[in-house]
Amino acid sequence: MRTPLRLITATALCAGTLSATAPVTAAVDTAEPSRYVALGDSYAAAPLVPPADPAAPACLRSLADYPHIAARALGAALSDVSCSAATVDHLSTSQHPGTAPQYDALTPDTDVVSVTIGANDNGLFAEALNCVNILPPPHGASCAEENTAGGTDRLGDRIDAWAPVFATVLDEIARRAPSAEVFVVGYGNYIRPGGCHPAQPFWKQDADHLQGTVNHLNAVLRQAAEEHGAVFVDTYTPGIGHDICAAPADRYIEGPVPTRAAMPLHPNATGARAAGESLAAAARATSTR
């Protein structure tokens, strides 16, 4: 475990020690809050979830996104530079006029880094929209059949080819923030096995194909995290029963037609909170190793 993350639990540990000794006249907490930088795309930024972050209107970033939830839980000082539609290229280059490259937020003093990236690099949002079928079979075309024609998995192959790119991301984070604990936050549970057509407009095989592709991307992210000494944060498992087929009040991710304030096929406020809580729990577990 790297030393800086210990600041997350320093206050609590000191309080426990002091309560076991007597007499004590006063306790002064001199530990500075951990410096936390959040990188990533719209899964991190939670676009259209109120309140909006006025610091980056072009990024559609929410002040209730998972980085803000985790930072509050950890008592960390947050620099959230996540931005909707971001790709790996936008970590090192400006995404919008006046928006700095996301890597610029990293410094040698950074203690904690989270990153969610890859869905846009692999075109998963566009692929999901291509799978929408309002009418039942055979009135339409199956995206699963199109993407796996000829016995190949076009999306899976694309993700595998992209995997080394993400490895370079983790290398660059480590170079710029060598003392930081790094958390790779995965993508969530979008749709349950078999889907729920017609309530959500994805045929059974297409629903399984879409979530299977997300799971494949998560597996690539997890493997890279393990190989680079980072921690993978699973947001799929906490989302079981909270996918787009759940009752509107129970959803963590909205469907193509949102029922709460959120971008289609993106986390709502409840989903962002669940992801932030998962990240905070992972950070606490790392700090006590």
Image (cartoon, grey):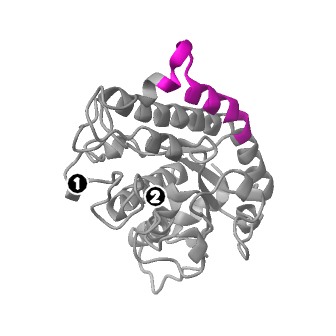
Residue lying furthest top in this view? 151
Residue 73: x percent and y percent?
43, 67
Residue 45 or residue 288, whichever sits in front = 45
Residue 39: x percent and y percent?
62, 59
Q: Main secondary structure of the magenta part?
A: helix
Residue 2: x percent and y percent?
66, 52
User: Residue type at mark 2?
Assistant: Ala
What residue range appears in magenta? 146-165
Determine the image quadrant of residue 92: bottom right
**Residue under label 2:** 280
Q: How many marks do you count on the picture? A: 2
Q: Is residue 141 left or right of residue 166?
A: left
**Residue under label 1:** 250
Q: Which mark is residue 104?
A: none
User: Residue type at mark 1?
Assistant: Asp
Residue lying at 68% horizontally and 56% vertically, measured from the top left: 180
Residue 222 in view (yes/no)? yes
